[in-house]
Amino acid sequence: MLPTRQWLAYGLLGLPLAMAALPIYVHVPRLYAEAGINLALLGALLLATRLLDAGIDPLLGWWADRTPRRSRLILFALPFLAAGMILLLNPASSASSENAESSTTLIRLAAALVATYFGFSLASVAYQAWGAEIGRDTGERTLLTASREGFGLFGVILASLLPLLLAADTAAGLARLSWLFVPLLVLSAVVTVLGASGRRARLAESDGKSDAPRAKAPPASLATLRHAFRDRRFVRLVGVFLLNGIAAALPATLVLFFVADVLAAAAMSGLFLALYFVAGVAGLPLWVRLARRIGRVRAWLVSMAIAVVAFVFALSLGAGDVAAFAVVCLLTGLALGADLALPPALLADIAESPSATGGAGGYFGWWNLVAKLNLALAAGLALPLLALFDYRPGGGTGLLALAVVYCLLPVVFKAAAAALVWRWRNELEVSS
C-alpha cells in the first residue's frame, strides 16, 4: 500500500477545491442578487457560464492527457481559480440598480465566473486523472480517491461554517473567506505536488517523464475524445453514475424546503447539513475497508440500500420530528461517503486498464460533465414537479407533494441504479 503521508498529501488539495465549489453554486446567486443585479440577467449569465463549464470538461480532459506532467497542469490552473474566487466573493457595491445592471458590472461578473470555472475544472480533471495514475492497483486507487473525497468533505464543512465565523454579515464573511482561501490553496497545492508524487514518480520526472508511468500514448486529436464511449464498461458505469447522481442531487436540491416546511425546523437546517457531511467523512474509512472485503461494487450496493431505507423512513416524518430526521441525515451522509469514494475508484481502474480506449483525462472529463449535469437535471425535474402539484414554499400547500418528491423520487432513481449495478457487477469491478 501507499505510504500514509503520500495518500494524505494527495488528498489535501481536495479540501480547497471543495471549499471553492460551495460558494460558487450556493452563495454567488444570492450575493449578486443582493448587490442589485437584475435576477433575469443574473440567471441568464449563470446558466450560460455553467453550461460552458460543463461543456469544456471533456476538452480539458483531452488537454490533461496531452500534458506530460499532470501536476504542472494543476499548478497552471490554480491562479485562475484563486483570482476568480477573489473577484466573485468581493462584488463591487453599487449606488443604484442601474449601475449594477451596467455592462461593466456584468462583464466583470462573467470574467470572474469564467476564470473560476476554468481553474476549478482544469485542476479537478487533472487532479483526478493524476490520482488514477499514482495508484498502481485497485486498493491504492480506492485509497487515493477516498482521501481526496474525505478532504473534500472537510472543505465543504469549512466553506459552510467559515463565513458565519468570520463576520456577522454573510457577504462580509464570504469576502474574508476569499482572502483566506488563497493561501490555503497555495499551501495545499505545494503539499500535494511535492508529497503525492512519491519516490517512483520523482525518479520519472528526473528523467523528463510524467508524474507517473503512462499506460497509453496521449491522444493525437480532439476526435479521440469519443473513444471513451467505445469502452462498454465506461458507458455502463456512467449510466449508473447518472441515475445515482440524480438520486443524490434531488434531496440536495430540496432539503432546505423539506426541513422548513415539512419538519417546521428551518433554524436547524445548518445543523442537519453539518451532520450529513460529517457522517460522510466518518463513513469513508468504513467503505474503504468494506470494499477490500467484499469488493467495491457490492459495497456500493450496500450504501444504496442504506439510502433507500433512510428515505422511505423520512416519508413518515412530520413537524417536530427533528431527532428522527437527524438519523436520516446520518444514514444518508454515510451513504454519501460511498458515492464519493467508490464510483471514481471504479472509473480510475477502468481508465488505467490495458483495454481502456482513451486516456484517464478524457474519462474524467466526461465524468465531470455528467456530475454537473446531475445537479441541473435534478433541479429541472424536482422544481417543475412541485409547481405542478401547487407547492408553495412557506405557504402550507403541497406539502405531501414535497415529501413524496424529496423522499420517494430519489428511491426510484437509486433502485434503478442498484439494479443496473447488480446486473453489470462483473464488468464494473475491474481488478488490477
Image (cartoon, helix red, strand yellow):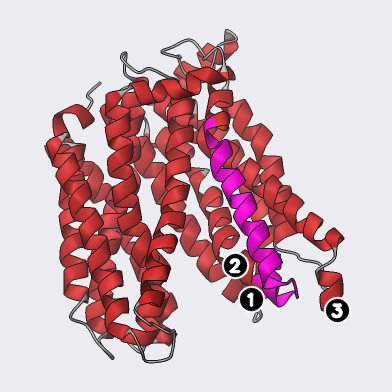
Start-end of magenta stretch: 31-58
Distance between mark 2 and mark 3 Cα atoms:
22 Å
| Disc 2 secondary structure class | helix
Which disc is residue 170 wearing?
Answer: 1
Kind of residue at disc 3: Ser
Q: Quadrant of residue 355?
A: top left
Residue marked by disc 2: 27
- Residue lying at the far front of the rendered structure: 388
Kind of residue at disc 2: His
Q: Is residue 264 covered in magenta?
A: no
Q: Are marks 1 and 2 in contact (CB under 8 Å)?
A: yes
| Upstream in sequence: badge 1 or badge 2 | 2
Residue at the (36%, 29%) spot, across then down: 348
Which quarter of the rendering shows the N terminus? top left
| Disc 1 secondary structure class | helix
Instruction: Please determine whether, in this image, residue 224 is positioned above or below residue 99.
Output: above
Which disc is residue 216 wearing?
Answer: none
